Image (cartoon, rainbow, N blue to C red):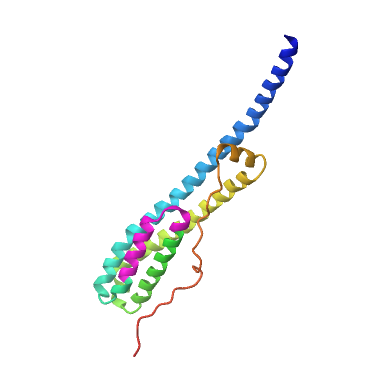
Amino acid sequence: MKKLLGPIGIIIGIIVVLGLILVPSYNRFVTSEENVDQAYSQIETQLQRRVDLIPNLVNTAKGYAKHEKEVFTNIADARSKLAGANGPEEQAAANDELSGALSRLLAITENYPELKADKQFTQLMDELAGTENRIAVARKDYNGEVASYNKQVQRFPGKFVASVFGFDKKEYFKAAAGAEQAPSVDFGDDE
């Protein structure tokens, strides 16, 4: 009996030590993954706010710039893509497309001084600018949480725990390729 108790004691000791190592590590992964998800939801909230503001902005601008249909169509298409995008990569690309379409709208407003002076349009632009700032902060916070999480997934012993329990690296919220380029605006002035 004493001979059997020795190996069982060793096995129990190993299990206890592994539990003391694995449980806190697992809990850190759960907490970190939840932080990433929470930060991502902040991006989604601000993107949704942006999507909700755009129809009011476009409708206000339409009253002044009735013949700028292509710009309004591009904004509507880009807004739909953003609303239907899934995951950070798709949302970042759709967000960049919408930003380009909005910058073309802003360029058009230069041709309509009455629109720039419109109180509702100005208020909507201020709200949109505030939302853009909140999106930038939310993206930064999200990418910070992803970096922290991904470091845990790649470091030892986290790499072992992550592979055992299925914690995978997360995607960063990145700008689409070419987003650093300003969009070209062509008003078709071939005169």
Which one is in front, 2 or 182?
2
Which one is in front, 76 or 111?
76
Q: Main secondary structure of the magenta part?
A: helix
Number of marks drawn: 0
Q: Left or right of 181: which side holds 19? A: right
Residue extending farthest to the bottom is 191
Q: Position of residue 57 (x, y in %)?
A: 31, 65
Q: Left or right of 188: which side holds 150? A: right
When the figure is inspected, residue 106 is found, relative to residue 41, above or below; the finding is below
Residue 132 sits in quarter? bottom left
When the figure is inspected, residue 172 is found, relative to residue 19, above or below; the finding is below
Q: Which residues are magenta?
A: 72-91
| Residue at left offset 41%, top offset 59% | 131
Q: Position of residue 52 (x, y in %)?
A: 32, 57
Q: Quadrant of the C terminus?
A: bottom left
| Residue at left offset 38%, top offset 69% | 101
- Give yes or no for residue 84 being in the magenta stretch: yes
| Residue at left offset 58%, top offset 38% | 28
Q: Position of residue 18 (x, y in %)?
A: 66, 29
Q: Left or right of 105: which side holds 13? A: right
- Give yes or no for residue 148 being in the magenta stretch: no
